[in-house]
Image (cartoon, helix red, strand yellow):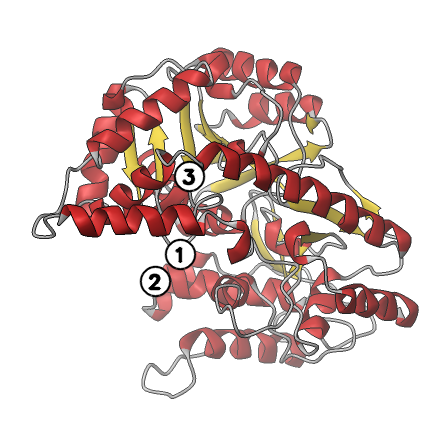
Amino acid sequence: MFSLNPQSSTPLVAQIVKGFCRLIQEGALRPGSKAPSIRQFAHAHEVSVFTVVDAYDRLVAQGYFTSRPYSGFFVRHRPGSDTGVPGHGPSFNFDSMWYLSRIFENRSLRMKPGCGWLPGEWLFQEGVRRSLRRLAADKMDLGGYGEPQGFSPLRHLVRDLLVEQEIAVTSKQVLLTHGSSQAMDLVARRLVRPNDAVLVDDPGYPNLLFSLRFLGARLIGVPRTPAGYDLEALERLVTLHQPKVFFTQPRLQSPTGSVAQLAHLHRVMQLADKHDFLVVENDIYADLDPEPRASLASLGQLRRVVYISSFSKTISPNIRVGYLATNPDLLEDLTQLKMISGLTSSEFSERLTYGALIDGRWRKHVKGLREHLAKAHEGAAARLLNIGFTIFSEPKAGIFLWARHPEIPNAAELAYTATEQGILLGPGHLFSPNLQPSAWLRFNVAFCDDPAVFTFLENQRQAA
């Protein structure tokens, strides 16, 4: 096929992409032909699976490959064009790894309507500073690693917060983690094996999807609707694939902003009981929801549900404190896996978070944050509708809106062009379980106050 040179200054990922592009352009790989599986290619060329996943992601994003559910990667039919993306040659490089790295470079792009965090001035900065001063005054012992399950007083507080949400739990069923991302990664590594059928939201959370692909899971996308899930599709997929686990975000979901209705939550739990699968509920935006709602964990408790949440979205993303709650047997396994992969989480960060949460102004901060977001939703939705966008769901809460314009068919191409104008967008293919091209874009309403963003979108619409 082609060879790789580990000693070359060209990264291996770029060598793989270039090699496949050359084979396709020369006709050695015809449209419709199947590419080697990720693990086959990695084994044959003695490179990591992670490297091949990255390269295949880029080939999908560039339009050379298409990913077919349960079948693998195939050479895409590209009628009338030798380039992967209309208007761009093979150098087009807006793939999931680019996004995951570039999105955290806060100063790289001036405008960030596609990012996933809140502005610093919206967060609980004063509460963190007060907690930090108290920690300094207490002369905390920095010589140890902390408890494997995490700082005990914070676990007790998490237990109390969950009980308020009608989730019956003890502090021994709570594991503190390095943000919700570590919590999901621990659960995925414990539950998922290569070729396991795993249900995920479609569209869903890119970092989780990438992690599951890396583990070799067969991702089964469950279509989201403004009311939650396409229940007919969900039942059909469960019956057909008999999944081991369903990773889902019922409340204020990223990227769609949708909220699953109570009837949809009940149906998910009924199917979990009937077909014997676990549900991993990502509820990281619970504090941003002004409405008291049931969760999957409150309906099924923790017998079939792993509940995951975080304080990063409301206190500070830099603190990186999340948690999970589940049944005692699974929690013991997850605690051991946490120790194997990174010893304990940071007790300093957990103490800092605990101090902020018991601050007398915490609840007032959360109330104000919800009001900020409601106002931002109203403004962002009005601006998008004014230039002809269709909005998937208008929750008026949480962080995101999911929108598309009928005259802008390729969100990946638009996002690439936007970076040249200093704008970070969230193109829809990154949120697809199978990285399929998409016209949809994720907008963070907290970063949609710059008129230049909408001027750019309007200009692109007119040029389309």
The C terminus, quarter of image: bottom right
Does 168 appear above or below 56?
A: above
- Label placed on residue 43: 2
Query: Considering only vertical position in the picture, is 252 above or below 453?
Result: above
Q: Amino acid at mark 1?
A: Arg
Q: Secondary structure at mark 1?
A: helix
Mark 2–mark 3 distance (CA, rounded to whole Å): 37 Å
Residue flagged by tag 3: what amino acid is it?
Ser
Residue identifier under label 3: 310
Q: In this orientation, does residue 462 appear?
A: yes
Kindly report the distance in space between the C-alpha atoms of the residues bearing marks 1 and 3. Answer: 33 Å
- Residue depicted at 37% across the width and 13% down the height: 168
Mark whose residue sits in front, 2 or 3 = 3
Depth order, front residue of 33/118 = 118
Pointer 2 and pointer 3: residues touching (CB < 8 Å)? no
Under circle 2, the secondary element is helix
Percent across and percent down for residue 379 are 78, 49
Vertical placement of 205 versus 164: above or below?
A: below
Disc with the residue nearer the chain's start (1 vs 3): 1
Marks 1 and 2 in Cβ contact (< 8 Å): yes
Give the residue at x 77% y 40%.
392
Residue visible at 64% across and 76% down in the picture: 92
Residue under label 1, please give it: 39
Classify residue 222 by image quadrant. top right
Residue 161 appears left or right of 386: left
Q: Earlier in the sequence, mark 2 or mark 3?
A: 2
